[in-house]
Image: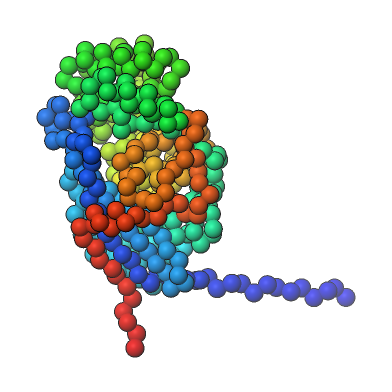
Amino acid sequence: MSASLTVPTAAPAVGDRIASVTLSSVTLPLPNAISDAKVFTGRQRPMTEVAFLFAEIRTEGGFEGVGFSYAKRAGGPAQFAHAREVAPDLIGEDPSDIGRIWTRLVWAGASVGRSGAATQALAAIDVALWDLKAKRAGLPLAKLLGAHRDSVRCYNTSGGFLHESIDQVRANATRTLEEGIGGVKIKVGLPDSAEDLRRVAAVREHLGDGVPLMVDANQQWDRPTAMRVGRALERFGLVWIEEPLDAYDVEGHAALARSLDTAVATGEMLTSVAEHHALIKVGAADVLQPDAPRIGGITQFLRLATLAEVDHLQLAPHFAMEIHVHLAAAYPHEPWVEHFDWLHPLFEERLEIRDGRMLISDRPGLGVTLSDQLRAWTVDSVTVHAPHRS
């Protein structure tokens, strides 16, 4: 007679519920006004601040997750307003059902579309849910996603802007390397392309041939200029030329990528997976540069990363290193993460950088705690919670 088989009892499908969501609009002042090529071509004013949307999600079981999105120049109040409208739909939801929640919130605001400010508002919520999920598991987010590495190559951008003299940019580059950062990116795209070439030549000479160097034109070249300057830049051994053309000029980027030996990088200004897919389909980017807060959060970033990996693309997420270090660590091919120190005042913790690489901390979730300074810079805040039951 065979032994009786004991069938284990399944655990409840729902272990927790979202009890409240706090949304905060935060304005981060920059120490100095920042100028890239868009300022020198007259399309933008110097940037003096960055607007952030923070989402703090709490569950009935006492877990908390934090996420953020951002807007440079205009857009911050719009993100806050949209998030405030859809946040009530979160209450009572199982926080583990992140994909379903994202879809529900998208449909809550379907009349304003599935990209841009609408989904950037959802990004803060989506990131908070992933942070919460990793904290519940007691894991850094990278480990929850399935890390391929415990550190990621990193390069600095914040020391290479055009409002600073070339002498200052060289000094910034020296400091960057002394801090353990592995590469340097400088801005180009000036109306005088000869000046761009002089700046790149000066930095390359200063760094030597062995230091990874990137340039970023911030979409300010037309097709003939991008081709001409791109060919002139070949001699500097650049890792990539970033945003040489308008972000939506898919065919122009594809033609440039086919013509140059230097890799073409783009994608940071796009606001959906579909827009990035258009780049991928025609080979318009050797290096894809998605921004999780801009495309709708981590859920959307992971969809895009799968598409990028299938085509064996390099990945170099834009800005928001506190989020992207985890996502880059989970990408199969060796990626880059962009180092900006602008967000330091918003968090209690700092990412560790050593030997050219940004390390994944052992703290659960994103590994960040909101600072008192962030609270002081909060210009509006609202908490949505379940109705009181008597």
Residue 235 quadrant: top left
Front in this rendered view, residue 180 or 228: 180
The extreme bottom residue here reads: 390
Residue at image position (16%, 20%) is: 191
Q: Position of residue 252 (x, y in %)?
A: 27, 25
The extreme right residue here reads: 1
Residue 41 quadrant: top left
Residue 118 quadrant: bottom left
Q: Position of residue 219 (x, y in %)?
A: 23, 29
- Observer able to see residue 194: yes
Q: Position of residue 94 (x, y in %)?
A: 44, 68
Compared to 97, does 71 lie above or below? above
Q: Is residue 349 left or right of residue 223?
A: right
Compared to 211, does 51 lie above or below? below
Compared to 60, does 113 lie above or below? above
Q: Quarter of the image containing the N terminus? A: bottom right
Front in this rendered view, residue 277 or 175: 175
Residue at image position (23%, 39%) is: 31
Q: Position of residue 129 (x, y in %)?
A: 41, 59
Q: Quarter of the image containing the C terminus? A: bottom left
Residue at image position (45%, 30%) is: 180
